[in-house]
Image (cartoon, rainbow, N blue to C red):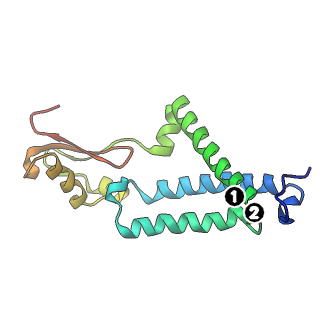
Amino acid sequence: MTVWCSAGSKSCCREGVGVNVIIRAAAAYLILLFAVRLIGRRMASMLAPFDLVVLFLFGGALMSSVLGEDHSMVAAISAVFAIGLMHVAVSELKRWSPRFGRLVDGTPVVVYEHGQWHMDRMRSLRMLESDVMVAVRQKGLMRLEEVRYAVIERDGKVSIIPQGQE
């Protein structure tokens, strides 16, 4: 089986190169998904510059392994489409299976309730009290005593439930 070739691109004409790129791209997507899940829940607006650097390094490191020696446009397009299709497939699996969704995205976690911090949960999520306090102030509250619950959502956002609300 010969894959498409652009004029002058000999590396692309080898047997199965396109399939290898697609398989490596799919594997890279799963690896990156797992790595991001391990890093913790920080929504994009809360990412520190260091967090962004780490994410870009992940992408750069994986992209070189996905393309390998084949730097043709066909290989790049194949990788982009494979990664896009993996994302669609994971999204569909999350919709179809709530258990898979919890595995990939996690579940909401209460980190503050009734005046008490759950430091073990905060550590496991790699969240700081100051991260939660930003959300408290954004909610228009000035003191922690005004907060009944603070919940880290699946997407990393912090939800604040004021005292007097359920």
Residue 25: x %, y % from top left: 67, 55
Closer to us: 18 or 91: 18
Label 2: element kind: loop
Q: Residue at x 33, y 44 (%)?
A: 153
Question: Between residues 118 and 51, which one lies in front from this camera angle?
Answer: 51
Q: Tell me where residue 111 appears, x and y as whole percent.
A: 26, 49
Is residue 6 at least partly visible in the picture?
yes
Which residue type does callout 2 highlight?
Answer: Ser
The amino acid sitting under disc 1 is Ala
Instruction: Residue 101: give x, y in percent of width and height.
Output: 49, 38
Q: Is residue 111 left or right of residue 116?
A: right
Left or right: 30 with respect to 138? right
- Vertical relation: 145 (above or below) 21: above
User: Looking at the rendering, which quadrant does residue 75 occupy?
Assistant: bottom right
Alpha carbons under labels 1 and 2: distance apart: 6 Å
- Residue at the spot x=90%, y=52% of the render? 2
Q: Quadrant of the C terminus?
A: top left
Classify mark 1: helix, strand or loop: helix
Q: Nearer the viewer, residue 66 or 150?
A: 66
- Identify the image quadrant of residue 113: top left
Toward the front, the furthest residue is 7
Badge 1 density bin: few <14, some 14–19, many ≥20, Cα 10 Å: some
Please give the label number shown on residue 72: 2
Q: Is residue 78 above or below residue 160?
A: below
Q: Residue furthest right?
A: 1
Callout 1 touching callout 2 (CB < 8 Å):
yes
User: Label 1, on which residue?
Assistant: 76
Instruction: Name the spot of residue 74 as percent of width and height, x first.
Output: 75, 56
At 63% from the left and 50% from the top, the residue drawn is: 83
